[in-house]
Image: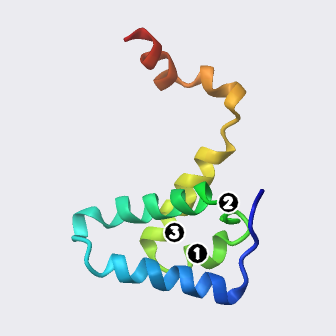
């Protein structure tokens, strides 16, 4: 189930992001943004429906949303076509 976000909800979530972002070293900011977006997905927030608003917040979230949505677009049935999946089974 996907949770819709009101403008107030989205503003609150992005303010939480900003609090953490301010204390993260520059070299880790993309990883923080990506983990943040994945966590939103994990908790059922409608990232796809709010992609523009989230992406417009900053450049790190912009790239993170792109990565997360591309990852989400890959059908589990097609995972066996992914070379990384083959490498996991070869170990």
Q: Distance from label 2 to label 3 (Cα)?
A: 19 Å
Q: Which quadrant is home to the C terminus?
A: top left
CA distance separating discs 1 and 2: 15 Å
**Residue that badge 2 annotates:** 44
Of the two numbered discs 3 and 1 on the same chain, state the one appearing first in sequence: 1
Could you tell which of marks 2 and 3 lies nearer the N-terminus?
2
Residue 17 appears in which quarter of the rendering?
bottom left
Image quarter of residue 52 = bottom right
Q: Residue at x 53, y 53 (%)?
A: 67
Other-residue count near label 1 (Cα within 10 Å), few / some / many at <14 / 14–19 / ≥20: many
Q: Which residue is mark 1?
A: 54
* Quadrant location, the N terminus: bottom right
Q: Earlier in the sequence, mark 1 or mark 2?
A: 2
Number of numbered discs present? Answer: 3
Label 2 packing within 10 angstroms: few (<14), some (14-19), many (20+): few
SS at mark 3 in the image:
helix
Callouts 2 and 3 close, C-beta under 8 Å: no
Question: Which label lies toward us, 1 or 2?
Answer: 2
Residue 85 picture location, percent across and down = 51, 22
């Amino acid at each position: 189930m996907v949770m819709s976000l009101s403008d107030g909800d989205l503003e609150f979530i992005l303010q939480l992001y900003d609090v953490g972002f301010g204390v993260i070293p520059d070299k880790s900011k993309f990883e923080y943004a990506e983990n943040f977006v994945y966590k939103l997905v994990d908790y059922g927030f409608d990232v796809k429906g709010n992609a523009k608003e989230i992406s417009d917040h900053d450049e790190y979230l912009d790239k993170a949303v792109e990565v997360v949505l591309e990852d989400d677009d890959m059908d589990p049935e097609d995972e066996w076509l992914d070379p990384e999946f083959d490498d996991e089974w070869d170990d």
